[in-house]
Amino acid sequence: MTPATTSTTAPAITVSGLRKSFGDNVVLRGVDLTVQRGEIFALLGANGAGKTTTINVLSTLLRPDAGTATVAGHDVAADAPAVRRTISLTGQFAAVDEILTGRENLELVARLRRVPEPRRVATGLLERFGLTEAADRRSGTYSGGMKRRLDIAMSLVGAPSVVVLDEPTTGLDPQGRLEVWATIRDLADAGTTILLTTQYLDEAEALAHRIAILHGGTIIANGTLAELTALFPPTTVEYVEKKPTLEEIFLAITGSETRES
Amino acid sequence: MFHDTTALTGRLMKQITRSPDTIITVAITPLALFLLFRYVFGGAIAGSGGANYTNYLLPGILLITVASGVAYTALRLYNDRTKGINARLATMPIARSAVLWSHVLTSLVSNLVTAVIIVAAAFAMGLHPHASVGGWLGFVGVLVLFTLTLTWLAVIPGLTASSMEGASAFSYPLIFLPFLSSAFVPTDTMPGPVRWFAQHQPITSVVESMRLFLDGRAPGDDLWVALAWLVGLGALAYALAVRIDRRAHA
Ligand SMILES: Nc1ncnc2c1ncn2[C@@H]1O[C@H](COP(=O)(O)OP(=O)(O)O)[C@@H](O)[C@H]1O
Ligand SMILES: [Mg+2]
């Protein structure tokens, strides 16, 4: 499947000066970021940092208090329908209809997205995600990893050019995690732009071309792994010289001494 | 919009056909009440105009059926909301109204199926309707309107409740309301304030209209009062539900 092409050459995602509060809880205090076409971009942040809030604005679920966001050049506030045709969101928790089979879930999305030949599209995705044998079982009987795969497959119906994954591996066992990583890499190889959020530093390191760290309501660091590594003060006395991990960079920037695991 | 509603209604109908116990569960309590009133209390109460008591009971039993049936609409919506399905649909390029209408149409179909079961049971209990085709149309029309109104009411807790119990709790007073109406016994024998309430609450006019249609008579003012209540409450619930839904999905 090739990603749907859009006429503009704008970046896949731009976010500028994004602010959002829930009551007194100021979550985003001016978030800026740009995701280029075809890259894997990781938005890294601790639990409660505002990753889901940012993503909900991008996928038209939430209106920001201030700031703008565009997806493939379409403004999320002014042209929500165009954004919805371009982007697809895999939420933090698998959103599959557990009473329907895997195939029915996929065919439903295909029909709603008005993709021709829903059955053929579903068959293709089931095969690609290793769900062919489970295709006609209720998705409620699937394992966590299988549900996650179905969830991602549902997001890929109609080959959206921008795919947003909110904590795609949280709650998965190591095997499921590796499967999802492989899926994300395949997608990126096929030219899809991917924005993913994660709390795991190693996940951002392993997958992303570029990483932004969301902390205290703003992006405190943004760049390639190499660029972020350069921000880290050079190692001093050590028996074995080693590159700083992203975790160390994160700690150096945020100045925190402890981190929840 | 039509295309989206059809696809989404198909999804919800599959949920129902795959757990037909939903329809049976909904039918069981009203059927038990029907039997209880008809055979246990029936002898004592039957002074209600000497007419066929099964005929007399049927409208009220149907309203109780619908009142408990719509709780499932609230539950299905609650589920879709808490399982992220609503959010997923909101990020897709589909008509937003299609999502709510798919729940409403599903409610209509499943409640009518349950109603058919109840009417079949009524025939077994000696139902003897005098309605012409027009009368049946009126009877079914009022029932459909009643179901639509209660379903739009059910959408509100479905969209707002923070627990499953909370989502379905609204239906208990609705199920109870027919007991304080002319559904089971004439209102004349009720004590003062109860009688006043019974004579002025919407269930009584709905029941009376359906009863007259069933008896092959033309309901006069009762029908207009019933329609005014149902259309008024329904429009209010619809407006509120759509508003809440818009708020939830910017
Ligand atoms: N709908 C909401 N209403 C009120 N507070 C919210 C809502 N959504 C998120 N929050 C709050 O905003 C903060 C950021 O949440 P979220 O964006 O989900 O963080 P993350 O995804 O990074 O874990 C949290 O403090 C959370 O409690
Ligand atoms: Mg989150």
Image (cartoon, coloured by chain):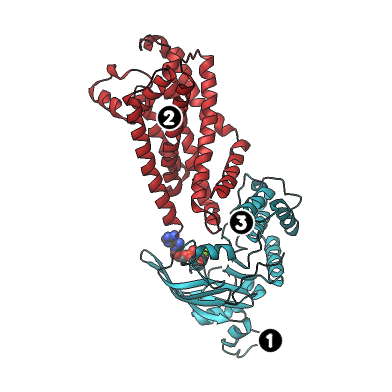
In this orientation, which residue lies closer to the viewer: B153 or A129?
Answer: B153
Residue A112 picture location, percent across and down: 60, 53
User: Residue A2, percent across and down?
Assistant: 71, 67
Is B154 placed above or below A8 here? Answer: above
For label 2, being within 8 Å of ligand 1 is answered no
Viewer-proximal residue, B99 or A173?
B99
Q: In the rendered structure, find residue A48 and report the number of the disc placed on it.
A: none
Q: Do the residues labelled 3 and 2 touch (CB within 8 Å)?
A: no
Q: Position of residue A60 (x, y in %)?
A: 50, 63
- Which residue position holds label 2? B142
Image quarter hosting the C terminus of chain B: bottom left
Q: How crowded is mark 3: few (under 14 residues within 10 Å), some or many (20 or more)?
A: some
Which residue in the protein does label 1 denote?
Answer: A240
Q: What residue type is labelled 2?
A: Val
Q: Is residue A225 above or below residue A127?
A: below
| Secondary structure found at label 2 | helix
In the image, residue B242 sits, relative to residue B59, either above or below, namely below
The reply to whether residue A188 is in sight is yes
Q: Which lettered chain is shown in red?
A: B
Which secondary structure, mark 1?
A: loop
Q: Residue at x 62, y 81 (%)?
A: A225
Which amino acid type is shown beneath numbered disc 3?
A: Arg
Which chain is cyan in the rendering? Answer: A
Same chain? Circles 1 and 2: no
Q: Earlier in the sequence, mark 1 or mark 3?
A: 3
The alpha-carbon separation of the residues under discs 1 and 3 comes to 55 Å
Q: Is mark 3 on a helix, strand or loop?
A: loop
Q: Is residue A27 visible?
A: no
Report crowding for label 1: few under 14, some 14 to 19, many 20 or more residues within 10 A (C-alpha): few
Query: Can you say whether A188 is above or below B89 in the image?
Result: below
- Residue at the spot of label 3: A113
